[in-house]
Every structure is written in structure tokens, then in C-alpha cells.
Amino acid sequence: MLFCVFIQAQKKHYWLIDTETNVRKKVKDSVSAVKFLDSLSQNNYFFTQLKEVKVKGDSTEIFYDKGKNYNETYVDLSDSIVQKLKIQKDFFTKNLDSTKRSINKKYIDEGYSFSRIKSKYKGKKNGFPVIGLDINKNDKRVINGFVVKGYERVPKRFIKNLEKEFKGKTYDDKNLLAINKSFQGHPFVTLERQPQTLFTKDSTNIYLFMEKKKTNTFDGVIGFGNDKTDKFTLNGTMNVNFRNMFNGFEAINLYWQRNPDRGQTFDLEVDIPYLLKSNIGMNTKVNIYRQDSTFANVKFLPAFYYHLNNRNKIGFRGTLETSSVIDTLYTQGKDYNKRGIGIWYEMTEPTDIDLFLYKTKISAGYDFLTTTYTKGNIKANQNQFYFYGEHNYHLSGNHFINIKGEGRMMDSKMEFSTNELFRFGGWNSMRGFNENSLAADYFYYGSLEYRYLIGSQAFFDLFGQYGQLNNKSLGVKPKLYSVGLGFNFFIPIGLMSFQLSNGNEFGNPFKFNDIKIHWGILSRF
């Protein structure tokens, strides 16, 4: 028979006992006990004394008196701190802890993430200790790269752009906040949690725990209003976006609209932001507009653009446009072809409020076009200008102001035909008018809208708009206004919008039967 005997060596126990409070603290060994007593002398208990050590079998009791906590002291800074921070060498402080934190933070903000302030007792002055402060900076830390976790199929160029913006920069709260902010309101990805950091001896890497957003959207709007004959009509808009389906931040947009005056619009737009893993993107748009049986316009707008950064892009575009008059009795229109090139710029600042599309958006463009009118083969040069700007301004609490403005202008030595004029009005522009019911060679409008948020699920809005258009062919340039109110709220299938609006020309009487009713739903899938 085999007997196994296990003999456990006696394990020693170390206790630290405060003679003032009799509080007992257990530590694993004598080295830990020394470190604890040393930490007291580094944290305002400058007169900590070892009183007695008692050994009882496997237990060692260390009695100490930490003395008074001196948070009010005279400070004597080291020469390195004085030279670095350009501050007084000797001074009195009523809060030593705060002084040490303030000094240490300035070093941390410069990338010395593991810096530590060292304290040393240097005597007494006027009944207070004189404490020498020095800095142990360790190595300066800079951001060396990013590691993507979770949703890893993001475009490589997107990560390279992040590295271009932040790699080599100081590892501090300012840059960490900027990294986190760059994902706020991003249309395709979000962060599951705050960025994490892995420190090694030679590198500092930021871990990004990404999650793919539901970015496909269906936006449907039904409108009720009167047409030119004051007949009550039903109109609507359908907008479908397929976005990031192939993990390249690409977008395919289908848009259809019917207005009360029997006009129809169809748009197809394809956007690929990173061609061949570069910062060059491609945008192609086809627009078809048909006004009942009067005329039809077809536009093809190919464009290439460059990402200045994640929020700004600038590009060049071409214009190919054809218009055909269908009704031979429509004498205001002309058959024509347009060819041209242009330049454009767009800036978008995201928002962290889900009820808003963005915080700020600005876009502007210029096109130089050559128009050939079929009848007589007459050619004319045209200049077209465009500007759009929108900003959500936070007043206080749940109160916001939305400011929006848009303007377009076309200029030529030839008189414009009616079928080539800009068309605006409706849900996304002058809201008190029928969709695309206003035609002009030059127009602008401004909108001021008060929004009151009800939690994070709804907001109420009250708005007013002012605008003016110029139509040389008709010889009119009326001043316009629009007023209304609305309510927007989340339901299980998406964001629902309900709006009442009324628009008219200044000088015309207000008519209740001109009120426009819009009901819409924006759903993400």
C-alpha cells in the first residue's frame, strides 16, 4: 500500500495596523508593506512613522502612525517642471493634490500618458511642510495605428484616412475625443463602445469596435393639395436608398415623384466613394422630368470627386441634357441639347441626434454649359450657379433652430425657354407650394424653423420661409412666403412626419383651401 503525505509549508501573513484608527490591512509580503508605507509619504502623509513590528508564529503585525494629512503646503518645483511649464518655482498651495493633478495633466496632454509626480519632504516653513515636486515622464506616447474589431469589412481607404489624420499625433484626450467624434453620426458605421488603447513597449494602438449600421432607407411622402384649377389632388414621393450593401460605403438611390400638376420626376443615382481603394469617388446621376404631355427632359450627370477628409469633398462633373417638346401647341418650349462641365463642393457635419439627418450641410456648384436649340441650330453659352446650406443650432435644453437656405441662377445672352428653367417648391424646398410648381431662371429662399424635442423619439416644429424667383420669359419676379407646423416621431417601422403648410405670393389673400398636407415615413432596413 502506498501512502502519499502532502505537507503544506506554513504561509506567512502580513498585517498593517494604523495605530490611530486600528484599521488592519492585509498585504501579501514585506515588499508590499514597504510600498504601502512609501505611498503614504508620497500622498501628503509626510511624517509617516513605523512604530512597532510583532511576529507571532506565521503572522507579522506592522504598526504605523501616518500622522497628519498635509494638503496645505509650500511647494518647491524641480527645474525641469519650471522650465517646461513656465511657472513660479516656489509657492504656497491650499490643495497639494489639485496642484499635483494639474501639473501631471499638462504632461499627459503632451503624450506622457504614464507620467508620475514624485513628492519629497524638504523641511518645514511657518508650520507647514515644504514639499519638493518632480516629474517622472516615462516615454512620450503617440498614436501608431488602428485595429478594427467587430465589423471589419469597412473600406481599407476609410481606415487609411483615419491613420492619415491621426497617426503620429500625440496620444491625449483631445485626439481621442476627435477620433470618437469622427464616428458620431457616420452614415455607415458606429462604435459599439469607446475606443480602447493597447500600450506596448514600442507602440500605442487604438482599438475600434465597429458595428455596421442599418443604412438602407425607404422614404415615402403622400401630399394633398390643389392643382392650378383648384381641384383637390393626391400626389406623392418615393425615395429608396440601398447603401453599403457591398461594404464599400457605396449608395444606390431611386427617386420618383408625382406632383398635383401631373408632372413626374424620376432619378437614379449611383455613388462609389473609394474607387480602386483610393480617395477618388464616382457619382453618376440620371434625371428624367416629364410635364404631363407637354415636354420631357432627360439629364445625365457623371461626376468624379476627391475626399478632402471624412466630411468634405470637391469634384468635377459633366452635364448631358436633352429636352423634347411633345405638344406642338406648347409655344413657350423649345427642343434643345446641353453639354457642359462644372465644379462642386460638399461638406456634411454629422449629428448625434437620430431625429435629425445632420448637424450641418453645405453644397455649392458652378457649371458652364453650351446649349444648342434644335430650331435654327442656335447655340448659346450658359452659366449656372447653385448653393445650399442647412444648420441645426442648439439653443438650450430641448430647443433647436433649423436654418436653411437655397439658391440657383442661370445666366445667358439668349432668352430661356420654359422647359429649361429650374423647378422648385414642395416638401424639400418652399413647403407651402405644390411639388415643382415654381419655375425660374433665378430663385432663392430662406427658412427658419423652431424645433422642440420630446425626448429622443419625437419633435414638434414651427417654421416660416421667405423667397423670391425671377422668370424672365414671363416677366415676373414675385416675393413668396410659406408658414406651417409639423410633428415628427418614431414608430416601430421608422420616422413618421406630418406637416401642414401654406404658401403664397406677398399681396395675395391668404386662402385656407391652399393648405398643403404632407404625411411621410422614413424607414431604415
Image (cartoon, rainbow, N blue to C red):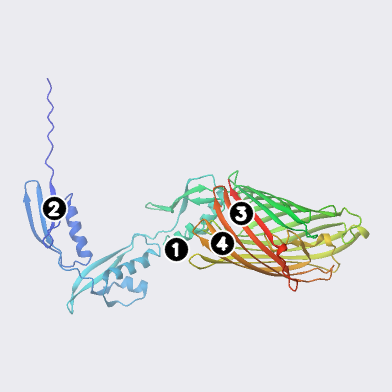
List the single residue furthest toward the right.
376
The three-letter amino acid code for the residue at tag 1 is: Lys
Whether 376 is drawn above or below 267: the answer is below
- The residue identified by callout 1 is 174
- The residue identified by callout 4 is 460
Viewer-nearest residue: 468 or 81: 468
List the single residue furthest toward the top.
1
x, y percentage for residue 31? Answer: 18, 53
The three-letter amino acid code for the residue at tag 4 is: Phe
Q: Is tag 2's residue or tag 3's residue first in the polypeptide sequence?
A: 2
- The residue identified by callout 2 is 15
Q: Is residue 297 visible?
A: no
Q: Secondary structure at mark 3?
A: loop
Whether 27 is drawn above or below 419: the answer is above
C-alpha separation, residue under disc 4 versus residue under disc 1: 35 Å
- The residue identified by callout 3 is 279
